[in-house]
Image: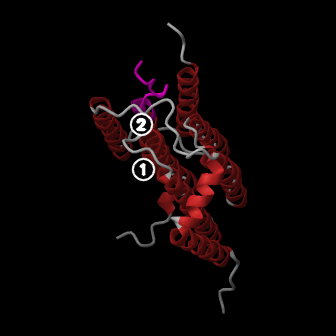
Amino acid sequence: MSISWPLVIFYVIALLTLCCAVLMLSFRKVIYMALTIGGVFVGCAAVYFLLGADFVGVAQILIYAGAITILIMFAIMLTNHEAAEPPLSWNLKNVASAVGCVLLAVVLLLAVRSTNWPGGGATTDINGGNTNPIVIGLMLFKQYTIPFELVSVLLIVALVGAVILAQDRKEDE
Amino acid sequence: MAPANFPIPTGSLLALGVLLFCIGLYGALTKRNLIIVLVSIELMLNAANINLVTFSRLGVAPSLSGQVFSLFTITVAAAEIAVGLALLIAVFRLRRTSEVQDLNVHKW
């Protein structure tokens, strides 16, 4: 019985990712939460690498683990950076949220478990002989050109809007 | 000899997505700091991305569309967090608070 190393690596990564996510919920200081969410994003990127999605993994590290985590840190520093969550209190809202989330997780996990998923061959090549970034680039500019352009318009509108929202306005204008 | 399966079972990957989604949902519902609520929503989007990439490799018809779709999701998530944090900073400048329960102007 040989050990399947990708499987072991996947379980270690999944465990670390879930640990980071649970730590995020249990920390009290907001800045520690932002640090652990970086760990979750890197763990997701590692899962993408295991699945052979190199380009998405690198984009995940660049955008999520790099840009978004730093953006969140800046937002924390610009607002009250010593903010802390109050200790966990079991009021009605928290209990109802916890029960609802656990129920949803159990139902979804049972559904995942009871479904017979296609395994996927070990040698299935979805890249068509090229490397992953080349094929994704070709797909983005041939098959998905219009969505790609629309998303770039959305991004520029969102970023300009963010600047306008965040700038200091005089009240008497 | 039967063709070997991909070493990671699909169910485990989907279970990881499910657990991340539910952790994010719990955080978004219960946390009081607005930044952490935004971060929890990002966590839920990430769980959806894991599912997309999983099915692009292990689905019935493996293709790259799932990966392209997850790239679009990442872009939209980046736009969302940028606007969200800008709103947060504007609210903080106006109300001197970044907690959810203090933003109750429109509450009945």
Residue A155: x and y, percent? 60, 70
- Callout 1 secondary element: helix
Q: Nearer the viewer, mark 2 or mark 1?
A: 2
What's the mark number on residue B14?
2
Residue at 41%, 37% in the rendered image: B14
Q: Position of residue A84 (x, y in %)?
A: 61, 46
Question: A158 and A4: which one is in front?
Answer: A4
User: In the displayed structure, would residue A161 be above or below residue A37?
Assistant: below
Q: Which chain's residue wears label 1?
A: B
In this view, the residue in front, A113 or B55, is: B55
Name the one closer to the observer, B81 or A9: A9
Residue A165 spot, x, y in % from top left: 62, 76
Alpha-carbon neighbours of circle 2 within 10 Å: few (<14), some, or many (≥20)? many
Q: Is residue B45 rendered magenta in the image?
A: no
In the rendered structure, which amino acid carries the disc numbered 2? Leu
> Is B64 located above or below residue A90 in the figure?
below
The CA span between labels 2 and 1 is 22 Å
Q: Residue A66 in the image: x percent, y percent?
A: 71, 50
Q: Which residue is mark 1?
A: B29
Left or right placement of residue A104 versus residue A137 in this view: left
Identified at 62% across, 47% down, the residue is A132
Left or right, residue A130 beside residue A125: right
Q: Which residues are magenta?
A: B1-14
Q: Main secondary structure of the magenta part?
A: loop
Q: Which mark is residue A142?
A: none
A65 left or right, relative to A148: right
Q: Tell me, yes or no, whether dots 2 and 1 are on the same chain.
A: yes
Task: Kindly identify which chain the residue marked by label 2 belongs to.
Answer: B
Q: Quadrant of residue A16?
A: top right
